[in-house]
Image (tube, helix red, strand yellow):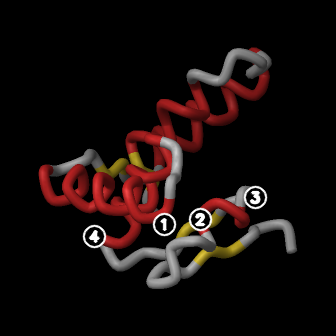
Amino acid sequence: MYISEISRLEVLGYHKLTSEEESYFKDVFSFVPIIFPSQEIFDTAIAIRKSHNLKLGDSLIAATALANNLSIYTRNLSDFEKVKSMRCIDPLR
């Protein structure tokens, strides 16, 4: 399991995050390897954003998964499923 630095930013930057949730996610992020965006990831994110009209953060997360041959675990399947070359899994299904 890996986490994109963009996912970490989105989770910890969420304005309705409670202090309990923040503490929980900080603990998770301290144990899971974080993948930082490279030039390749940014270039892929540009192509994804143009072709699938994804938000900036989602484009970067998708590009990170593609560049590292990883699946995405998300509750937001509808946006990510637009990128057909990527495997998306809802962890609660």
Mark toward the viewer: 4 or 2: 2
Cα–Cα gap, marks 4 and 3: 21 Å
Disc 3 marks a residue whose amino acid type is Arg
Q: Residue furthest left?
A: 39
Task: Tell me where residue 88 sits by quadrant.
Answer: bottom right
CA separation in Å, label 2 and label 3: 10 Å
Mark 4 in CB contact with mark 3 (< 8 angstroms): no
Drawn side of residue 31 relative to residue 93, left or right: left
Q: Amino acid at mark 1?
A: Met
Nearer mark to the viewer, of 1 and 2: 2
Q: Specify the quadrant of the image occupied by residue 28.
A: top right
Q: Amino acid at mark 2?
A: Phe
Taking the spot 86% from the left edge, 74% from the top edge, the residue there is 93
Horizontal placement of 81 versus 4: left or right? right
First of labels 1, 4 by sequence position: 1
The numbered mark, 4 or 3, whose residue comes first in the sequence reads 4
Task: Please state which of residues 23 and 4 is positioned toward the viewer in this rendering.
Answer: 4
- As drawn, the label of residue 67 is 4
Amino acid under disc 4 = Ala
Indicate the secondary structure of the residue bearing disc 4.
Answer: helix
The answer to the question of whether label 1 and label 2 lie on touching residues, with beta carbons closer than 8 A, is no
Residue drawn 40% across the image and 54% down it: 49
Residue at image mark 3? 75
Which of pointers 2 and 3 lies earlier in the amino acid sequence?
3
Q: Position of residue 81 (x, y in %)?
A: 62, 73
Query: Tag 2 or tag 1, which sits nearer the N-term?
Result: 1
x and y percent of residue 53 in the render? 50, 54
The residue that appears at 35% across and 72% down in the rendered structure is: 66
Q: Which of marks 1 and 3 precedes in the sequence? A: 1
Q: Quadrant of residue 18?
A: top right
For residue 1, the mark is 1
Q: Is residue 87 above or below residue 68?
A: below
